Image (tube, grey):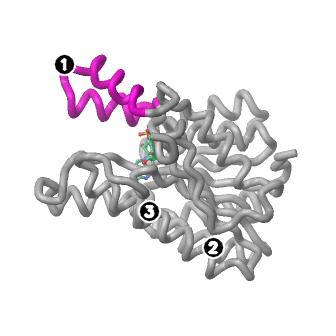
Amino acid sequence: MLRFDGKSAVVTGAGSGIGKAIAAALARQGAQVAILERDPEVGQAAADEISQTYDGRATFYRCDVTSQTEIRDVAAAIVSQQGTIDCLVNNAGIAHVGDAATTSEADFDRVMNVNCKGVYNCAHEILPIMVRGGGGVICNIASTVAWFGIGERFAYSASKGAVVAMTYSIARDFVADGIRCNAILPGRIHTPFVDGFVKKNYPGQEEEMFQKLADFQPVGRMGQPEEIANAAVFLCSDEASFVTGSIHAIDGGTISIR
Ligand SMILES: NC(=O)c1ccc[n+]([C@@H]2O[C@H](COP(=O)([O-])OP(=O)(O)OC[C@H]3O[C@@H](n4cnc5c(N)ncnc54)[C@H](O)[C@@H]3O)[C@@H](O)[C@H]2O)c1
């Protein structure tokens, strides 16, 4: 069950947090994993750690998902090493705090470039490889904010809503090519993303804010990256062969039982 032996997987933003946990879980299940990451330090460290644990099954490729040229070059390098790409996990993302009136044009563009255009860039370059290979699977990491409003997440929510819409669109357009596409909406997950967010936006109130953020989930805590990785492994696996165009909230009850 849930084996990926002989499969080639790409995870973006896999140097940290959720992406790193997904890359490790796919390698544990037998996949050869390409870690696409813009920060070479964390990207290489994640690849080394996963490789040492899982028989060399992780390789670091430095790239920025906002650059289609970089994604094209990296995808070609992965194909020359692995033969094809079977799974793509679009995970790279950045946060931003602000409402529609306070979000600057530069910040809106920056968030949309990574969270929305990054998904398009990877899909644009990797879907033709999957079609040539006879099929594949894409798992997009969106967010619960695609489905409900939380304060001052205007640009971030817009970008994640677009990820959900792109998920439906890709699933529809490539269903006849044997390609499945689904999305996960993580609730609040304890990663460097959350720690950085609290530190930057609530200096001096870190502990209090952290507790407030944890209490927000009906289960009374934040999730762990591995809890998102488990869902991603399932959605990318052959066991999920009937699952496409579907959106999965993995959120400690945040959307359904508030
Ligand atoms: N942590 C949460 O509570 C939470 C909740 C919902 C959704 N998410 C989503 O999950 C994903 C991962 O979040 P995380 O908490 O693990 O974040 P993180 O900041 O810990 O990790 C994100 C990684 O993406 C990389 N990255 C950022 N921009 C990039 C780019 N342009 N090109 C390549 N790599 C880039 C970063 O260097 C970092 O290593 C994001 O898309 C985020 O929006 C997170």
Measure the C-alpha gap from mark 2 to mark 3.
17 Å
Task: Measure the alpha-carbon separation of dots 1 and 3.
Answer: 33 Å
Label the magenta part by its dominant secondary structure. helix
Q: Is residue 38 above or below residue 221?
A: below
Instruction: Please tell me which residue lies in front, 239 or 150.
Output: 150
Q: Residue at x 55, y 30 (%)?
A: 224
Q: Are marks 1 and 2 in contact (CB under 8 Å)?
A: no
- In percent of width and height, residue 190 lies at 46, 30
Q: Which mark is residue 118?
A: 3
Amino acid carrying mark 1 in the image: Gly
Please report the residue visible at 76 percent of the width from the left and 74 percent of the height from the top: 178
Q: Which residue is mark 1?
A: 204
The segment highlighted magenta reads 190-216
Q: Are marks 1 and 3 in contact (CB under 8 Å)?
A: no
Which label's residue is closer to the chain start, 1 or 3? Answer: 3
Q: Which residue is mark 2?
A: 171
Q: On the rendering, which quadrant does ligand 1 occupy?
A: top left
Q: Amino acid at mark 3?
A: Gly
